[in-house]
Amino acid sequence: EYTVIGDAVNEAARLTEMAKDTPGQVLTNAATLKTANVAEQARWTVMKSIELRGRRRMTQLARPIRASLAERCEI
């Protein structure tokens, strides 16, 4: 059994919670997006900065520009 702790883990948990209510259900932070290549960055839109629960720093959010295939097929 393994335990993972730390700020990055807390941030990922909060983003996962928020993603459930986001179109496409995918979120990341802008800092992570900046590490992607230019083609991948072009597929995302940077959103507002928010204070995630349990963190002192603001986190700038990013989400994919296109909705998932599942969303496009919803009736």
Image (spheres, rainbow, N blue to C red):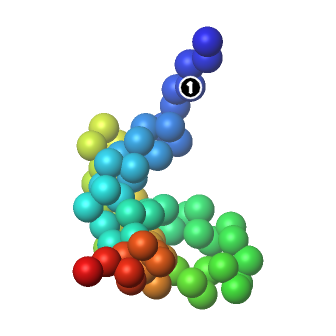
Q: Position of residue 33 (x, y in %)?
A: 59, 69
Residue drawn at (47%, 77%), measured in percent from left and top? 69
Image vertical order of residue 9 relative to residue 18, above or below: above
User: How many C-alpha atoms fall within 10 Å of the one at disc 1: few (<14), some, or many (≥20)?
Assistant: few
Q: Position of residue 56 (x, y in %)?
A: 33, 45
Q: Quick one: quadrant of the C terminus?
A: bottom left
Residue 34: quarter of image: bottom right
Residue drawn at (51%, 68%), measured in percent from left and top? 30
Q: Position of residue 43 (x, y in %)?
A: 57, 84
Residue drawn at (70%, 85%), measured in percent from left and top? 39
The foreground one among 73 and 10 is: 73
Image vertical order of residue 5 relative to residue 69, above or below: above
| Left or right position of 20 against 34 | left
- Residue at the right extreme, as displayed: 37
Image vertical order of residue 37 relative to residue 5, above or below: below
Q: Secondary structure at mark 1?
A: loop
Q: Disc 1 designates what residue? A: 4
Residue 40: quarter of image: bottom right
| Left or right position of 75 against 12 | left
Q: Quick one: quadrant of the N terminus?
A: top right
Amino acid type at circle 1 is Val
Residue 4: quarter of image: top right
Tell me if I can see residue 66 in this picture: yes
The foreground one among 75 and 29 is: 75
